[in-house]
Image (spheres, helix red, strand yellow):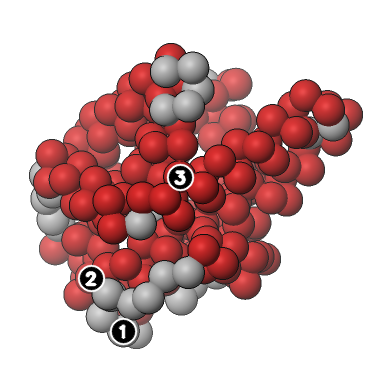
Amino acid sequence: MKKNNLEQLIAKGYDFDIEHSYRSGWEMFKAKTLYSMAYATLILSIQFLFVLYLTDIAFVFSVFLAGPLYAGFFLVANKISRNEEVVYGDFLNGFQYYIPVMMVWVVGQILVAFGLVFLVIPGIYLMVGYLFALLMAIFGGVDFWNALEYSRKLIHARWWKFLLLVLSLIVLNIIGILLFGVGLIVTMPLTYYIIYCLFEEITQEALLEE
């Protein structure tokens, strides 16, 4: 059923407002500011631990931990959107979707890397196109490959506008880094909330209402 709804959405087309997505993401961040900042701090601490002290096995974070950890922001965003109570442990629920999330994360990263290394432009296209892939894996009821493909197909319809969004999010997080890195504990969760709010806005009739 969800696949049919997604196909209809892709065929029908849609549009979105980047500024509205930022406002919605900011309101979501404000709803759980301390939890969001604390969880971002946890992720950054784990990442720095691998980079600084576990260099030889740094791939463990990027391959086995990053996807489920970042997915936690999306799951909490969904609860906030539904006006459900959020506890800090909800951020770790990405591990409940470990296999599909990890597959989407790893395969997506590999395909983007190949595209960047060999032809550059396909890599950039896929990097933008897979923006909704984790969300599709969690909320779309599809396997990892269809999560990647439905994300790509959906974003393809407004790819240039999504590119502007991605570039703005990159700038946002660069600003977070320049603020002695401390700004990342704000810009990281805000980034994922913005992406979630946009995903919900576009797909709510096709996916989230179920």
**Above-or-below relation of 104 to 85:** above
For badge 2, the amino acid type reads Gln
The CA span between labels 1 and 3 is: 30 Å
Percent position of residue 207, x then y: 30, 74
Residue 143 image-quadrant placement: bottom right
Q: Which residue is mark 3?
A: 37
Nearer to us of marks 1 and 3 is 3
**Above-or-below relation of 93 to 184:** below
Count of numbered circles in the view:
3
Q: Residues within 10 Å of mark 1 (few under 14, many from 20)?
A: few
Can residue 190 be seen at all in this image of the molecule? Answer: yes
Among numbered discs 2 and 3, the one appearing first in the sequence: 3
Q: Nearer the viewer, residue 114 or 188?
A: 188
Q: Residue at x 45, y 45 (%)?
A: 37
For badge 1, the amino acid type reads Glu
Q: Nearer the viewer, residue 96 or 83?
A: 83
Task: Name the side, left or right, on which 39 lies relative to 140.
Answer: right
Q: Which residue is mark 2?
A: 204
The CA span between labels 2 and 1 is: 9 Å
* Quadrant containing the C terminus in the rendered view: bottom left
Q: Residue at x 51, y 57 (%)?
A: 71
Q: Nearer the viewer, residue 167 or 129?
A: 167
Please tell me the numbered disc located at residue 210. 1
Among numbered discs 1 and 3, the one appearing first in the sequence: 3
Q: Nearer the viewer, residue 69 or 113?
A: 69
For badge 3, the amino acid type reads Met
Q: Residues within 10 Å of mark 3 (few under 14, many from 20)?
A: many
Among numbered discs 2 and 1, the one appearing first in the sequence: 2
**Above-or-below relation of 126 to 200:** above
